[in-house]
Image (tube, coloured by chain):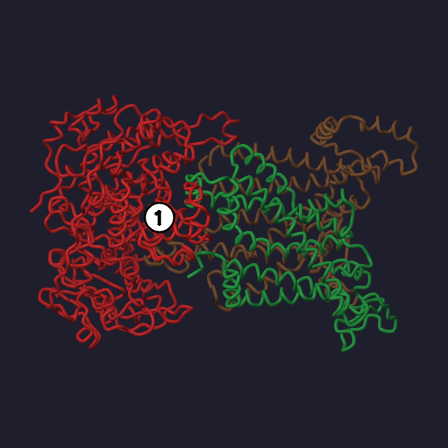
Chain colours: A green, B red, C brown
Amino acid sequence: MLSTMKTLRALMRSPQGAVGIVLVTLLLLISIFGPLLAPQDPESFNFGARFSPPSAEFLFGTDWFGRDLFSRILVGARSTVLLAILATVIGTASGALIGIFSGFVGGWVDELIMRTIDAIMAIPGLLLALMILTVLGSSSLNAVIAIGIAFAPGMARISRSTTLAVRELDYVSAARARGESKLWIIFAEILPNMVAPVIVEATIRVAFAIMTLATLSFLGLGAQPPSPEWGLMIAEAREHMFRSPWPILAPGISIALVAIAFNLLGDGLRDVLNPHSQE
Amino acid sequence: MTQTTVLDIKDYSLSYQTQAGPIRILENINLQIAKGEVLGLVGESGSAKSSLAYAVMRDSPGQIASESGSIMLQGEDLTQLADQDLTRRRGKQISMVFQNAATALDPTQSLGAHLAETLRAHQTDSTLDIQKRVYELFELVGLPDPELMAKKYPHEVSGGEKQRVVLAMAVSCDPDLILFDEPTSALDATTAVGMLDLFAQMQKKIGVAGLFISHDLGVVAEVADRVAVIYGGRVVEVAKVDDLFANPKHPYTQSLLASLPRPSDTRSKRGLKIDEGTPPPRRGDVPSCNFSHRCPKHDASVCEQSRVLLQPHEDRLLACARADVVVGETSASPSLIVPATADVVLEVKNLTVKLGRTSMLDQMLNKTPVQVHAVNNVDLQIHRGETVSLVGESGCGKSSLARALVGLGPFEGELLLNGRSVETLDAAYRADVQIIFQNPDSSLNPRHTLETILSRAIKLYRPEISAAERGAEIRKLLEKVRLPAHYSSRYPHQLSGGEKQRVAIARAIAAQPKVIICDEITSGLDAAVQASIVALLRQVQQDTDVALLFITHDLAILRHIAHRTAVMYLGEIVETRSVDGLDQRPYHPYTEALLSSASSPDPQTQTRRVRLTGSLPVRTARLSGCGFESRCPRRIGNICNEQPAPLRQVAQSHALKCHHETAELAKVEPVWKFT
Amino acid sequence: MTISYVMKRLIYLVFTALLVSLIVFSVTQLLPANAATMILGEYATDEALAVLNSKLGLDDPAIVQYFRWLSNVLQGDFGTSLRTSQPVGPTIMDALGRSAILAVTSLVLVCIVAIPLGVLAASRRGKPTDLGVSLVSYIGVSMPEFVLATLLLVWLASPSVGLFPASGYVPFSEDFWGGLHHIALPVLTLTIVLTAHISRMIRSEMADTLEMDFIRAGRLRGLSKRRVLFHHALRNSMLPAITVIALDVGYLIGGVIVVEEVFAFPGVGRQLILAIQNRDLPMIQAGALIMAGSYAVANLLADLAYGALDKRIKY
């Protein structure tokens, strides 16, 4: 699409946007093709080379079983990055729908929904995710659902306020005066103008989701061993942390790098999509 | 030049760096302002008039690509000064009055503290009693009860009062020069004239030099001694106020004045010139004369020989290579307003719009809501082929009325379309009554092409046109509003302001309506664009006999579009009268004040000033008397606030609501004297 | 600020607290196994379960159970831990005290460090100082607490370095320096992460404020740079900053949970994780409620501060 290409070009002009998009593209490729790229079997033990530092053979070193950390990171990217994106999509889509509905309908329905959302948001995000996982039980997929649910209220609030702002604009008034159906107004007049802020917010939230997902796995409530999920890798490495820092450093830096990439992309997108910054 | 020159701008040029390369902002500016003199600077939007003010203040919003020339203030070149030196001079030697006083004041600081900090920043005399000086300044700018005022915060006072505080700050340290950047544009007409009086008065008292920037030539005519006309970043003409407006020499000045309505237009049968040219080039090659692409006098063999610079010419300075050549300028044809018919299309009876909603919590706390009556018992008739202009200041309820009429808000009262009472605003009604909004930037969905925008109206209101035929219909509509057919695939942001408003008009006429409500549709536009939009509307009316409700706060334009005018104040129509007889008394006291507050650069007209004091109250159910009573200069007594004003029929199409007898009101001095 | 504004906020707090308690209660109600099963174990007989159920009131409708639980909580009775058979109230209150030390110390440190950093970055926009601060805070916000905490452990608490103890807690009343020593790493972790977050927010608020007309107006009437920056820009940015900091208390609470787990610090967070792992219902309810309650109170305080500072709020 024309406007997508334009956005992309504008994005490449800003330093953070360019770095962000390159990193994110690279990460997505790794997440998808990671297992194919891994030089070694991530599960194969190598007792001769336990706790080795980075070398030509083991790019990121090895862990206490002598497993190749680089291969584990590559394979684990899928369960970290892709699942985080899934969690964000769940949270964004459900939150945005609730928010648009609430903002568009208005009145007491809106008030009821928003008060409930306020109350849910009065529970800190991680705590809410923990409570949901208590009910659902520990697993990667349940962690994804928990993060999705924990994200939805914030997203609902943002999309509601955007809806309210867009709703007051004259082109929506014009459509209402014209007697357009509610569906047309929501889907053709309001929604296209909300995509930009929602995408920006969602991109930044992917970074959050990655960090939260890793945190949940670290606490033992997300991915279960022997998965090479990055948060879990750190949790397991803690037993041996004073022997070698590499089993902690490799996944730790990976998590931070991925989060930085999505934060950069989100900030770049915000600058590009902000109508005030357009010439 | 007179005795002492305060500001001397010599050959100043400025360009900004943008992503697409450097862009020329100001080119070879030469201007002088003498002590005690006010120089007006006029130009359309995008002419870089404000950029000049900020260049003088040495505070550029953009990234400077190149800068040359000098800006001498009292013999000192401002362009050469270091930052700290500039800080010492700003506010002390040179100060500024901003367009929007509401945003120029720190919301977390009291008004008195604003003045005190300015005084303290430039304090040289340690014995100065700052508190006392603050009160003096408040009094100087006509703010009553300075001690109370000093304690107030910006959000607690009116727009006019804020602008007075900004003015007080500007004069607080006895500057040599004050820059006024559109200081009255954000104010209502009746408030703005008060400010202009104040400027004139202050000017006399302290004899400061001023640079007064405005797009409104009438306002400039009011306050300035000399006027400089700026076009595309170049000054094209500088002359004494009277000389310039009576006898403009530069083709651009001529064109600008020709598209501006005047109070005398009804008498002189003068029409408005339509000249909607493209903006001058700001990148690439430097043209010899940047008006040449629009100039009726353009002759490449003369005009393109060398750079056309500002030179003395008779009684003024002029930048024109063919100043002596007179081209038979085809004067604009008079505004022919086709008479309306006698059949009523739309009638409203007793229409009231109440605003204000209470939250659930307020209801729980048992608070009774205070409802504002934005529109109060309005009766109005519009005939087929007629234009009724609804005039009034911001907050008078004219937009609430418009929104109610197209079903955008609840109302009480009766609505008749073609003599039949309308119960629900159904599709048929919506097709017959269309609305055009003030700002086409927000009334056209930025994500839709013109084709989508126009086809929706066709699909909804003209089901007889099949999907296949819609393309042809869209081309026809674009042609009607004089836009090329290939525009249909464009997005709104690819169009100019005037073009966007044409699209909004096309969307309204797509429904083949009986009535179009135009809500301030020319307010944001330059004079020439306004003239062309008005001409287009008249053409549409002539072709289709549509009735227009033309809502505006600009009284000058209504002589060129309306048959009748209805004047609104505080939710109520206080007077309806024909535009033909606008020059004749009697007037409702508010109409009188409103008409007299419209400034005009017309040298043949003298306008008598009526000043209103106080600010617009809020109408709730409690108000029992005449709404204008609190500010009326012709208030009689308690009768005015105790009883509603009676409706007085002056003539067949002239009625007003006032406690005064019409004979009494007919005795007031005329608003205009024509010479 | 008027009495009615305060009243409105208080009503709002009560309303929120009720809803939160309802959510907390219903989440634990959804658990597959109930308290009786937990106590008696999987192989308990049906009769024994039924007896215990009726004794604990678990046969009653959910709504009755909720109000009974709520009224007990309001009287300070959080029930008995299924894991330790000790009353939950005193346990959680002790833990809360220890967590509060962590949270408050970090928050104070963050305010001292983050606000000046944000202001500095905004006032030097685009200059090396700004880029440096932005880069560091970028890394800070992209680093989950558990990663940072673990790395700090590896570097500062390893047996070879031994600067700080790796885990545990010593009461300040017993050994002040020991207490300080023990909270140093958890507080450092929380402070770094939160500082990154808040200084970024302050910077962007300040940058927005600095674009406003009244800042230019102040500059153009010859006010000094300092005055414009600290008096006008900072004061106007403080209001949104208060809200931002209050919202970040939510992150702080999440961070406290993680950090307590990493450093084996006996606070509410660790209690909660333990309770979740052991399905200790009363403890989960109490922990969640106390944490959400602290957050709600923080938001209330922020609202009141906002109301007191902003002259425009008049409800």
Asked if residue A245 shows in the view, the reply is no
Left or right of residue B171, residue C159 in this image = right
> Residue shown at 37%/59% (left/top)?
C224
Q: Secondary structure at mark 1?
A: helix
Which is more toward the observer, C174 or C298?
C298
What residue would you read off at disc 1? B506
* Quadrant of residue B64 within the rendered picture: bottom left
Percent coordinates x, y for residue A174 in the rendering:
41, 43
Percent coordinates x, y for residue A183 in the rendering:
53, 41
Tell me: residue A101, above or below residue A205: above
Percent coordinates x, y for residue B516 in the rendering:
32, 40
Percent coordinates x, y for residue C75 in the rendering:
71, 29
* Quadrant of residue A234 within the rendered picture: bottom right
Total marks shown come to 1
Tell me: residue B123, above or below residue B201: below
Left or right of residue B28, residue C310 in this image = right
Left or right of residue B575, residue B571 in this image = right
Left or right of residue B464, residue B551 in this image = left
Q: Quadrant of the C terminus of chain A?
A: bottom left
Q: Chain of mark 1?
A: B
Tell me: residue B592, above or below residue C182: above
Which is more toward the observer, C236 or C165?
C236
Asked if residue B642 shows in the view, the reply is yes
* Residue at the outermost left position: B675
Q: Would you call the spot at circle 1 few (<14 residues within 10 Å), some (14-19), or many (20 or more)?
A: many
Tell me: residue B487, above or below residue B652: below
Identify the amino acid type marked 1.
Answer: Ala
